Image: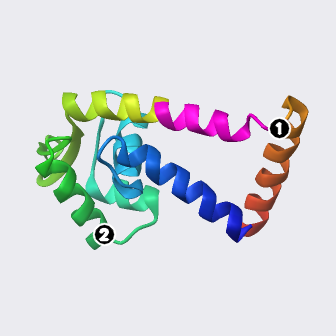
Amino acid sequence: MARLAKHLERSLGEVFSDFGLNGGEFDVLATLRRSGPPYQLSPTALFNSMMVSSGTMTHRIDGLEKAELVERIPDPCDRRGTLIHLTDKGFSLIEKAVEAHVANGQQILSVLEKTEREALAELLRELLVSLED
């Protein structure tokens, strides 16, 4: 499993780097995208959903903000808080990156028949559930 994970990590890294991103940055942008319009979350919601430290999240947000992919905006519901908002540039980039990510996954799994892919998905789901309990 470690060998497979290494190959998958390398493949994902190549896809993300085509868009000037690393895996952590991709995760932040994809999480904001999944949140739906207006594509914004609090920093706390972001780091809780990704199981990283607040310091790691701050570092990721700083880099994405510098690249103009996200912006910090005041939270209209909490004058002390801020929200991380996906910019138009960030939305456009993550749309393309997700499309490439999905295509990469399909290409990797293309060596398996449909029934094998379905069986693999079920087995991996069972394993994940057992590890997360």
Q: CA distance from mark 1 to mark 2?
A: 37 Å
Closer to us: mark 1 or mark 2? 1
Q: Is residue 20 visible?
A: yes
Q: Quadrant of residue 127?
A: bottom right
Say left or right for 111 vs 79: right
Q: Upstream in the sequence, badge 1 or badge 2?
A: 2
* Residue 38 picture location, percent across and down: 27, 29
Residue 62, placed above or below residue 78? below
**Magenta stretch prevailing secondary structure:** helix
Circle 2 sits on which residue?
56
Is residue 104 inside the magenta stretch? yes
Q: Is residue 38 visible?
A: no
What residue span does the magenta drawing correspond to?
Answer: 100-112
Number of residue marks: 2
Tag 1 secondary structure: loop
Q: Amino acid at mark 2?
A: Thr
Identified at 42% across, 55% down, the residue is 23
Say left or right for 6 vs 26: right
Q: Quadrant of residue 118?
A: top right
Circle 1 sits on which residue?
112
Residue 55, placed above or below residue 97? below
The N terminus: image quadrant: bottom right
* Residue 126 picture location, percent across and down: 82, 55
Q: Nearer the viewer, residue 133 or 109?
A: 109
Q: Residues within 10 Å of mark 2 (few under 14, many from 20)?
A: few
Identified at 85% across, 30% down, the residue is 114
Tag of residue 28: none
Identified at 36% across, 72% down, the residue is 53
Q: Nearer the viewer, residue 74 or 101?
A: 101
